[in-house]
Image (cartoon, grey):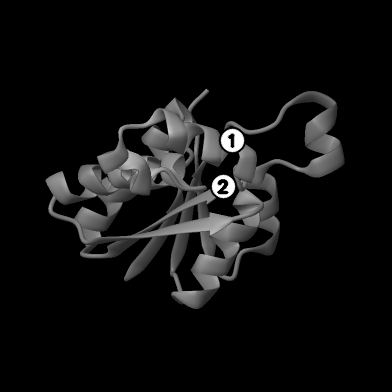
Amino acid sequence: MFKSIVVGTDGSDTAAQAVRQAVDLARAVGAKIELVSAYEPVPAQRLAQERRQAPEDLQWAINPREDVDATLEAAAAVASEAGVTAETYARQGDPADAILDVAEEQEADLIVVGNKGMTGAKRFLLGSVPNKVSHHAPCSVLIIRTT
């Protein structure tokens, strides 16, 4: 049925619900989870300032994607606790594109996303993540209703 399930996460409550449901499904069918999170690069000036403020032995850990790495580690812990194998993918750029790219690369059978995204005029101008994913996915899509 499903061997590879891609799930997008940004650390939000909506994404956490999607991760939990994807993990439950993966456990039930013996699939692996591919966890994806997108990030925008942090300006070099801000990184330099944060490094100066950090203790010397921790300065190496301050990088453009430290927040997304923490988000992915938390989601991977959910999978691990359930006995599900999970790989993580931090991608720079648009969240929907990141999810779609990983789904294609890993030949995923299913993509899982939460239904909460942009609202109002922005949704129509830019498109929400679930909308873009559902229209361009190379596989089936499960949109978790969280609102």
**Horizontal side of residue 46 vs 111, given as left or right:** right
Three-letter amino acid code at the position of disc 1: Arg
- Which residue is under mark 2? 39
Residue at point 38%, 40% (across, down): 71
* Residue placed most toward the observer, 72 or 99: 72
Task: Tell me if mark 2 has few (under 14), some (14-19) or many (20+) residues whose alpha carbon lies within 10 angstroms of its own.
Answer: some
Three-letter amino acid code at the position of disc 2: Tyr
Residue at point 60%, 50% (across, down): 95
Location of residue 7 in the rendering, given as x and y in whole percent from the top left corner:
43, 52
**Horizontal side of residue 146 vs 118, given as left or right:** left
Figure check: 123 above or below 39: above
Residue at point 53%, 23% (across, down): 147
| Pointer 2 or 1: first along the chain | 2
Where disc 1 sits, the SS reads: helix
* Residue placed most toward the observer, 65 or 113: 65
Quadrant for residue 11, please give it: top left
- Which residue is under mark 1? 46
**Horizontal side of residue 21 vs 138, given as left or right:** left
Check if mark 2's residue and mark 1's residue have beta carbons within 8 Å.
no
Location of residue 42 in the rendering, given as x and y in whole percent from the top left corner:
60, 42
Residue 48 in view, yes or no: yes
Figure check: 1 above or below 69: below
